[in-house]
Image (cartoon, grey):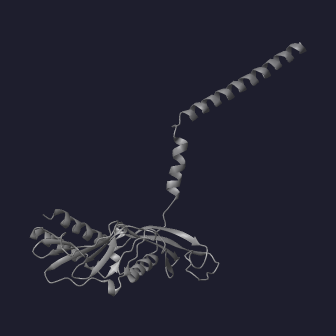
């Protein structure tokens, strides 16, 4: 009898162990089913959503923005309303020069919290490093997208326009090295001559309509602030480029086919309008 009871007890224990194992396996199978029921891209999307929710862009302080815009206005004569801040990010600069050390300048080796600010006007861009409040601003002068004009020496300025001339272009350089002068007159005549041509053999006279002349004058009037006897030079090492000297009633501006895309927006518009006048003249 004792042996029988022992066998019965062992059988109950064995049955309980087996049932527990079956339930564990079943639970695991259910969990696996639930896991595989999740979207395939769940793990890929979740981190992005978390990052998107947690990252908050810190707005640029107004004092810093004003300091940068005013610096461009002071140095380049561009109205602040024509400038746009296209990027700003908080930075910690590694020295007191905001990591824009000038030649022969000694910088304190201290961490300076501040901002990196990018300002644009058309294709022209400026990169600034500032401290936290904007009381110190430095411009990255060697930025390839920034094109700073330089004054044209008085000895190199062309003469003022005659009374009946609306606009004048002088082009020089390139592979051929010849210099041409093209003038637009009030009556719509477009006259082109080669300077130095003793026989005047390359003179051409074409015309545009009075409406085209008026429309072009309106474009030039909007860009008059750019005609301040300034030159937009080519980058160092450039060769065989053509230099264009444009003169309006207001003054002269000079650029070349390399620097053209980095001109101020109003000046680019004037250049485009002039090219249209030349191409449509008959």
Residue 69 against residue 240 in the figure, above or below: below
Quadrant holding the N terminus: top right
Q: Nearer the viewer, residue 236 or 131?
A: 236
Residue at 22% of width from left, 84% of height from top?
Answer: 160
Would residue 245 be seen by someone viewing this image from the given angle?
A: yes
Residue 88 against residue 38 in the figure, above or below: below
Q: Nearer the viewer, residue 239 or 85?
A: 239
| Quarter holding residue 157 | bottom left
| Quarter holding residue 145 | bottom left
Q: Position of residue 66 (x, y in %)?
A: 42, 78
Left or right relative to 25: residue 14? right
Q: Nearer the viewer, residue 17 or 280?
A: 280
Would residue 195 be seen by someone viewing this image from the given angle?
A: no
| Quarter holding residue 254 | bottom left
Left or right relative to 110: residue 52? left
Q: Position of residue 29 (x, y in %)?
A: 62, 28
Residue at 61% of width from left, 73% of height from top?
Answer: 94
């Amino acid at each position: 009898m004792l042996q029988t009871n022992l066998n019965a007890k062992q059988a109950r224990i064995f049955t309980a162990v087996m049932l527990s194992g079956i339930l564990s396996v079943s639970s695991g199978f259910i969990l696996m089913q639930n896991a595989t029921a999740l979207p395939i891209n769940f793990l890929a999307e979740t981190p992005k959503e978390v990052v998107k929710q947690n990252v908050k862009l810190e707005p640029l302080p107004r004092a810093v923005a004003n300091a940068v815009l005013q610096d461009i206005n002071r140095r380049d004569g561009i109205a602040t309303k024509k400038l746009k801040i296209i990027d700003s990010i908080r930075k910690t600069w590694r020295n007191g020069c905001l990591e824009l050390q000038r030649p022969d300048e000694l910088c304190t080796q201290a961490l300076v919290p501040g901002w990196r600010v990018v300002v644009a006007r058309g294709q022209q861009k400026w990169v600034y490093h500032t401290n936290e409040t904007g009381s110190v601003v430095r411009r990255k002068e060697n930025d390839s997208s920034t094109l700073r004009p330089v004054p044209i020496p008085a000895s190199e300025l062309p003469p003022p326009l005659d009374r009946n001339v609306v606009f004048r272009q002088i082009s020089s350089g390139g592979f051929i090295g010849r210099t041409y002068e093209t003038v637009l007159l009030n009556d719509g005549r477009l006259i082109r001559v080669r300077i130095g041509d003793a026989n005047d053999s390359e003179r051409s006279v074409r015309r545009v309509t009075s409406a085209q002349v008026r429309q072009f004058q309106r474009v030039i009037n909007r860009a008059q602030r750019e005609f301040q006897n300034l030159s937009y030079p080519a980058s160092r090492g450039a060769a065989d480029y053509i230099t264009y000297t444009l003169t309006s009633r207001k003054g002269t501006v000079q650029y070349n086919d390399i620097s053209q895309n980095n001109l101020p927006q109003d000046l680019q518009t004037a250049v485009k309008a002039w090219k249209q006048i030349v191409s449509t003249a008959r």
